Structure formats: structure tokens, C-alpha cells
């Protein structure tokens, strides 16, 4: 099924603009454009240097800290093609601002990077291709999605289903996406998608939002709004709470 999220109906007004989310999106795009400008994104030596290669990260000897650990951060800012970066940035754009608002700017940086690192480590532990580099932000974004599920399960996400846009509760969109990751892990194929990284990111995001959320941000709170408020609107939506 073709099911692509396009936007969400944020159930509460933002405390401040999501500057960190915007900065992460911008940095990913800048890195992608830079790689295109210097010869394209299919640069395997570059990806092995700055992406996560399980055999290198878990090597018992040789190399230095830069080779072993720094790629756990840099890999999540590299992408292998237009579809790769567009899909990841779309998901981050939709869900990231809500989590940044729920935890605050500084803690969102910590949250995002921690989800990405955990995702990479889980991938390294279970990957069947230990010599292949892992790149992409999807592990960190999986953590963002898990956190969104934990705090905004009843929010509506506008989803493109084939050729029609329909509102679907966030809980169903994210649970369906998560179930797809588990299904691929249980039925592995020869594809190059890092399903285990997504699983690791989901677990990290669900755990971290519990401890990093601002005071007053409730878990699994069904806050709904009666009308859609544009992300660029200053109006505060009318909220009602279902429990």
C-alpha cells in the first residue's frame, strides 16, 4: 500500500519555533547538495569513512576513536539519493517540531542524536552485512516517531493513500510503520534498508521521551483540536481532551 504522511494537525500551539528541527533538515540538505557538487552521492570510500561500518565500529584493534565512534554521529547526515533524503526529511518535518516542543531545543539535540546512535549500534549488532556502511537519518527519525506516538497518539496525520489524502490518527500511522519494520526484520530480504536501525531508533525514542519531556507534557494524552492550524499560524487552537 502506498501510504505517505504529508502533514499533521498539531494538537497544541508551539511554545517556540522548532529551530533545531529546521536546522537538522537544513544541515542534511546542505550535506547532500555538497556531496552532489563534488561528484555525486555514490562514493563508497567516503561512506565507509563517515558512515557506520559494523566491522570498523566494533573492531577490537586498529584505527582511532575518530574511525570507531565519530561515524555514529556523522552517518545520520548522509543520504544515498533524492528519494532517501526526501523521505527522511519529510518525516522529520512532520513529526520533529512536536517533539522539539515537548522536550525543548537543547534536549531535542540530545534526543535526536541519541536515537541515531542507538539505532546505529543496534544495526551493528544484528546486521547481516557487517562490511557495508550504514547512512541516513531514518534511525534517528524513527525515535522521533516513537516519541510522537507516546505523547500525541490521537493527533491526525494527513496521509496520501494511493491518490487520495485522508486524515488518520497518528497512532495508526506510526504503529503501521513500526509493524512494517518488524515484519521486514522477521522476513529478511536482499534489500539495503537498515530495518534493525529503525527498530533501535523506535526503542530509543520511546524510552527517552519519558525522561526528557518537559514538566506538564503528558504521555499518551489524547489532545485533539477541532480545526487544522497551519504550522506557520500564530493562532492558538481550541483544544479538547479525551481520556
Image (cartoon, helix red, strand yellow):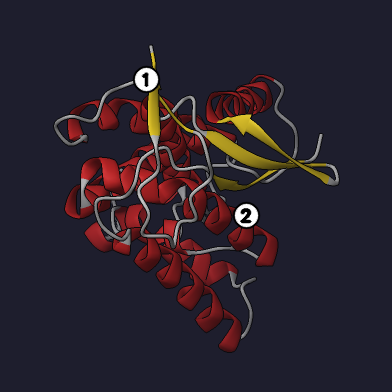
Answer yes or no: is residue 125 visible.
no
Q: Residue at x 43, y 71 (%)?
A: 26
Q: Secondary structure at mark 1?
A: loop
Report the quarter where the N terminus lies. top right
- Nearer to the camera, 209 or 59: 209
Q: Nearer the viewer, mark 1 or mark 2?
A: 1
- Nearer to the camera, 28 or 124: 28
Q: Is disc 1 surrounded by few (<14), some (14 to 19) or many (20+) residues within 10 Å?
A: some
Q: Which residue is mark 2?
A: 87
When asked about the image quadrant of residue 83, the answer is bottom right
- Nearer to the camera, 55 or 185: 185
Answer yes or no: is residue 230 visible.
yes
Q: Secondary structure at mark 2?
A: helix
Answer with left or right where residue 20 lies relative to residue 169.
left
Report the quarter where the C terminus lies. top left
Taking the view exactly as shown, the residue that stands out farthest to the right is: 163
Taking the view exactly as shown, the residue that stands out farthest to the bottom is: 37
Q: Residue at x 31, y 22 (%)?
A: 219
Q: Is residue 141 above or below residue 233?
A: above
Q: Is residue 32 above or below residue 207?
A: below
Name which of mark 1 and mark 2 comes first in the sequence.
Answer: 2
Answer with left or right where residue 227 lies relative to residue 176.
left
Q: Is residue 168 above or below residue 38?
A: above
Q: CA distance from mark 1 to mark 2?
A: 26 Å
Q: Residue at x 14, y 32 (%)?
A: 215
Taking the view exactly as shown, the residue that stands out farthest to the top is: 243
Residue 29, x across and y down, in percent: 50, 72
**Discs 1, 2 touching: Cβ within 8 Å:** no
Residue 90, x across and y down, in percent: 57, 55
When asked about the image quadrant of residue 2, the answer is top right
Answer with left or right where residue 81 lies relative to residue 233.
right
Please tell me the numbered disc located at residue 220.
Answer: 1
Amino acid at each position: 500500500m502506498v501510504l505517505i504522511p504529508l502533514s499533521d494537525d498539531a494538537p497544541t500551539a508551539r511554545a517556540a519555533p522548532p529551530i533545531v528541527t529546521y536546522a537538522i533538515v537544513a544541515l542534511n540538505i546542505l550535506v547532500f547538495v555538497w556531496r552532489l557538487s563534488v561528484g555525486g552521492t555514490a562514493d563508497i570510500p567516503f561512506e565507509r569513512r563517515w558512515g557506520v561500518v559494523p566491522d570498523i565500529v566494533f573492531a577490537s584493534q586498529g584505527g582511532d576513536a575518530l574511525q570507531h565512534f565519530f561515524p555514529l554521529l556523522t552517518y545520520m547526515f548522509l543520504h544515498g539519493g533524492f528519494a532517501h533524503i526526501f523521505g527522511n526529511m519529510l518525516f522529520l518535518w512532520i513529526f520533529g517540531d512536536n517533539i522539539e516542543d515537548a522536550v525543548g531545543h537543547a534536549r531535542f539535540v540530545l534526543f535526536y542524536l541519541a536515537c541515531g546512535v542507538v539505532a546505529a549500534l543496534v544495526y551493528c549488532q544484528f546486521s547481516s552485512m557487517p562490511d557495508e556502511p550504514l547512512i541516513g537519518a531514518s534511525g534517528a527519525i524513527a525515535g522521533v516517531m516513537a516519541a510522537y506516538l507516546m505523547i500525541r497518539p490521537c493527533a491526525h496525520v494527513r496521509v496520501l493513500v494511493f491518490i487520495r489524502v485522508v486524515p488518520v490518527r497518528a497512532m495508526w500511522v506510526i504503529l503501521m510503520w513500526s509493524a512494517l519494520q518488524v515484519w521486514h526484520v522477521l522476513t529478511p530480504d536482499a534489500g539495503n534498508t537498515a530495518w534493525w536501525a529503525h527498530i533501535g531508533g523506535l526503542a530509543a525514542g520511546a524510552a527517552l521521551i519519558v525522561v526528557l519531556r518537559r514538566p506538564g507534557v503528558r504521555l499518551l494524552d489524547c489532545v485533539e483540536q477541532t480545526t487544522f492550524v497551519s504550522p506557520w499560524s500564530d493562532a492558538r487552537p481550541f483544544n479538547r481532551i479525551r481520556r
